[in-house]
Amino acid sequence: MTETTVLTIRRVTEADLPSIVAMLADDPLGATRESPDDLTPYRTALARIAEDPNQHLVVAERAGRAVGTLQLTLIPGLSRKGSTRAIVEGVRIHADERGSGLGTELIEWAIQRSRELGADLVQLTSDATRADAHRFYERLGFVRSHYGFKYQL
């Protein structure tokens, strides 16, 4: 295995923000809601995330370059006999890595890490317009089971 094929998944640092925000903005949905030119709100959010032990914001790095990211959130609850849920959010793969298997590696990492952290269920949402993403998650064993709703504040 060469350095260019080794994948490292680690916690995000402030130095990773430009690359991660660029990935968040690099699609039709993100282009309208992200601001890569002003990292101030992202720095504030990263500080809040870092303080919360139930938040696991990670970057996938290959050869020193950020190539993917996701946030894993643990939510202890009463339902399902006191189960802990793991929520996968903000999954992004760098444009030139899409189709390489990196997304599968990143989601499989999230599932394994969720097990290690004591979660009983992994769930995620995907925008209704992302048909390719839906097929991807179903191929990995996720089941469409709920409707998602949002209320913009």
Image (cartoon, rainbow, N blue to C red):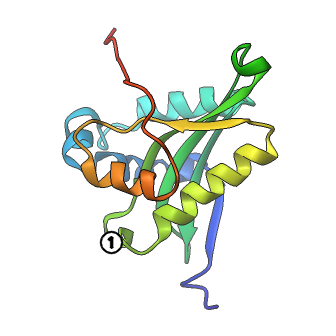
Q: How many marks?
A: 1
Q: Quadrant of the C terminus?
A: top left
Left or right: residue 96 versus residue 48 is left
Q: Would you call the spot at circle 1 few (<14 residues within 10 Å), some (14-19), or many (20 or more)?
A: few
Q: Nearer the viewer, residue 87 or 62?
A: 87
Q: Residue at x 26, y 36 (%)?
A: 128
Q: Taking the image as drawn, is residue 111 in sight?
A: yes
Q: Measured from the top left, where is residue 39 in percent x and y?
A: 40, 38
Check disc 1 and report its element: helix, strand or loop. Answer: helix
Quarter-wise, where is residue 99 in the image? bottom left
Q: Nearer the viewer, residue 151 or 82?
A: 82
Q: Looking at the image, is 19 positioned above or below residue 49?
A: below
Three-letter code, disc 1: Asp
Left or right: residue 59 versus residue 148 is right
Q: Nearer the viewer, residue 15 or 130?
A: 130
Q: Residue at x 60, y 50 (%)?
A: 58
The residue to which callout 1 is attached is 96
Q: Measured from the top left, where is residue 4 in percent x and y?
A: 54, 84
Q: Looking at the image, is 135 positioned above or below residue 129?
A: below
